[in-house]
Image: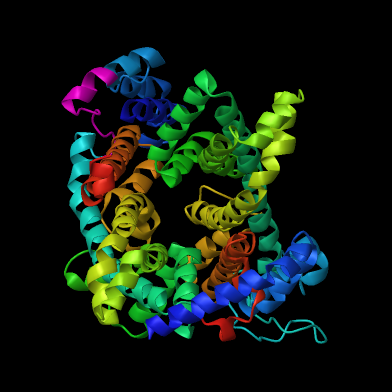
């Protein structure tokens, strides 16, 4: 079985090589990515979900059917599809929480905080880590030793534990959570950026840039950095999923987002004690977390393949026909 | 490395504020508070406290717990077996399944089975473990009544927490196994073996599996390390008497000595496991051993 698979694979690769010139003309275009995306239904679904979620979070007051803070003690812990108090309003599609607040609206508003904490901490850790790695790898010597020593120490330290301890010391608030998450994760970017710089600093194009007198900064940011954008983007996507989950864990433990703000992790913490009487309070915020993280992971996997010239052909041909 | 970590932990925990006020009655007089602080050496300058702390370390003396009034390290080590037991059962569930799934999806790449395995393993990485824990409780404990909701005791108690914790290593190991297997199957010796007329099963199970397991075993080791660290939330939810739930209780009670001791023990375990993994890696891969 697998032997035949392998020959098909070989043929597909052969065919791909012949197709290459035509593809190369399009490689730089955005259309290639769009075509690859339309080709992969699962990733397309993930992207559609993320875009919709992003819009819902940004325009939360418009997207949410109810005020997320509006309490109604007559409608406490009501199951999904319970009619609303007002006669012509939408029903509470996902039910209500222990204070009679609409669960769907709270999930939409919770998305604002969950997503922005994830995005901001990824941006901060990504920028700091990448710059540190770039400089360490390019300058070598003392800077490199210092940065990599710090990275090694921190990598040995379990990151959730570090976050717990620092939050315990500083107190919980949105900005503390963002900073703590950024501080625990910058090392990954530093390692990756340094590795790529080390591989590229001896290459001909860097030498040429040095020969015509480019400044170090120009070489690093204009010449070397663009070459690592693809892997950085993949890593940042993976990290966004991981950090949204970390924020949820911290909030669940009471060391993250504090009421009256809300995030999915905090909603789960609040709903936990009602698990027996009102399962929907726990089910839906968790599903929101799962679908968001899963979509981001699917997107990252797809990005990794499609930005890799060796693998790209797989994503531009019909999956079912190539088999390999 | 452990040393720098111990220093960080010590100073971070001292920044948190006064544990004494939480210990005593809210109406305690300032005088009483001062007496207790003096008893635990909390009124000394920070550097003096640090000196005391350092001098105790070589003897494994982290100081006495203010909450349980016993040596902190002893309390932490008493919780260690439960944590290790949970991690062991989790890996015993996750590892074989993950390896099997990884092999299946590598042998038939881009097939339906491969796609299902890929999505499942990504889902394993995407699921919030504490939410999975609550769902497990809801379905298997509350709904079906097969397992107890929480606690510690016979074999029944370990099933739900272990299944919950297995999701992440399952996803990660099966992905690594798949990639490693695909890489191996592309090698020349596989073609040779096939050309000799060996069956595909022999090629996969006897030729490639051993070579492909090197990265898998390494990853599994690192997953054990992160299990020791990541089990904190799960231990709390299932009321599992391990180090993780102890740490959270200690944080709530501002019991600094236990926080420090538990953190150091967890970190030391993680570092040890990672070190052992690197040793195994060197031993398993001749290129590293002789390199």
Residue A65 drawn above or below residue A205: below
Residue at x-position 27% and y-position 63%: B91
Image x and y of residue B92, in percent: 23, 66
Q: On the rendered structure, is B262 left or right of B15?
A: left
Q: On the rendered structure, is A244 left or right of A47?
A: left
Between B241 and B177, which is closer to the camera in this rendering?
B177
Image x and y of residue A89, in percent: 80, 83
Image x and y of residue B53, in percent: 28, 21
State the extent of the magenta-drawn residues as a range: B54-67
Residue at x-position 75% and y-position 37%: A222
Image x and y of residue B43, in percent: 37, 17
Between B141 and A186, which is closer to the camera in this rendering?
A186
Q: Is residue B241 visible?
A: yes
Residue A103 drawn above or below residue A239: below
What quarter of the picture does the N terminus of chain B occupy?
top left
Q: On the rendered structure, is A157 left or right of A106?
A: left
Between A85 and B171, which is closer to the camera in this rendering?
B171
- Give the colouring mode of the picture: rainbow
On whether residue A246 falls in the magenta region, the answer is no
């Amino acid at each position: 079985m697998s032997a035949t698979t392998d020959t098909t694979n070989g043929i597909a690769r052969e065919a791909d090589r012949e197709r290459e010139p035509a593809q190369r003309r399009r490689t730089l275009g955005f259309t290639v990515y769009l075509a690859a995306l339309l080709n992969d239904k699962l990733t397309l679904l993930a992207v559609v979900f993320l875009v919709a979620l992003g819009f819902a979070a940004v325009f939360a007051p418009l997207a949410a059917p109810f005020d997320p803070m509006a309490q109604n003690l007559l409608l406490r812990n009501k199951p999904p599809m319970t009619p609303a108090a007002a006669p012509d309003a939408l029903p509470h599609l996902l039910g209500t929480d222990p204070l009679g607040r609409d669960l769907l609206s709270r999930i939409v508003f919770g998305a604002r905080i969950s997503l922005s904490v994830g995005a901001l901490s990824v941006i901060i850790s990504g920028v700091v880590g990448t710059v540190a790695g770039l400089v360490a790898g390019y300058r070598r010597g003392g800077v490199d030793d210092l940065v990599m020593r710090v990275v090694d120490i921190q990598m040995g330290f379990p990151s959730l534990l570090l976050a717990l301890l620092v939050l315990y010391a500083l107190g919980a608030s949105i900005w503390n959570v963002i900073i703590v998450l950024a501080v625990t994760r910058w090392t990954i970017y530093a390692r990756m950026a340094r590795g790529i710089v080390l591989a590229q600093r001896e290459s001909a194009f860097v030498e040429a840039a040095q020969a015509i007198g480019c400044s170090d900064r120009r070489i690093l940011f204009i010449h070397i950095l663009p070459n690592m954008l693809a892997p950085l983007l993949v890593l940042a996507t993976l990290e966004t999923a991981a950090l949204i989950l970390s924020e949820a864990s911290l909030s669940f433990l009471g060391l993250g987002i504090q009421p009256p703000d809300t995030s999915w992790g905090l909603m789960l913490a609040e709903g936990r004690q009602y698990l027996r009487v009102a399962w929907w309070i726990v089910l839906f915020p968790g599903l929101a977390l799962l679908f968001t993280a899963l979509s981001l992971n699917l997107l990252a996997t797809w990005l990794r393949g499609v930005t890799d010239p060796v693998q790209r052909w797989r994503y531009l041909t019909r999956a079912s026909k190539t088999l390999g | 490395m452990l040393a720098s970590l111990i220093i960080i932990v010590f100073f971070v925990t001292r920044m948190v504020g006064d544990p004494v006020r939480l210990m005593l009655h809210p109406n305690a007089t300032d005088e009483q508070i001062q007496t207790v602080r003096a008893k635990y050496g909390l009124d000394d300058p920070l550097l003096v406290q640090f000196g005391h702390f350092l001098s105790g370390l070589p003897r494994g003396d982290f100081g006495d717990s203010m909450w349980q009034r016993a040596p902190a390290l002893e309390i932490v080590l008493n919780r260690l077996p439960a944590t290790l037991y949970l991690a062991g059962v989790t890996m015993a569930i996750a590892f074989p399944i993950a390896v099997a799934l990884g092999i299946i999806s590598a042998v038939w790449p881009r097939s339906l089975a491969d796609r299902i395995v890929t999505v499942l393993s990504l889902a394993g990485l995407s699921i919030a473990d504490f939410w999975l824990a609550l769902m497990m409780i809801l379905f298997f404990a509350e709904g079906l009544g097969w397992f107890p909701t929480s606690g510690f005791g016979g074999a029944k108690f370990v099933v739900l927490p272990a299944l919950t914790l297995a999701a992440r290593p399952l996803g990660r190991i099966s992905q690594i196994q798949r990639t490693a297997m695909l890489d191996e199957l592309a090698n020349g010796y596989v073609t040779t073996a096939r050309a000799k007329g060996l069956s595909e099963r022999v090629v996969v199970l006897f030729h490639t599996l051993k070579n492909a397991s090197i990265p898998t075993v390494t990853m599994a080791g690192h997953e054990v390390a992160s299990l020791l660290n990541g089990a904190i939330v799960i231990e709390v939810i299932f009321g599992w008497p391990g180090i993780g739930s102890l740490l959270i209780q200690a944080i709530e009670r501002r019991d600094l000595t236990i926080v420090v001791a538990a953190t150091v023990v967890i970190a030391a375990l993680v570092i040890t496991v990672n070190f052992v993994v690197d040793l195994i890696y060197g031993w398993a891969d001749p290129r590293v051993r002789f390199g």
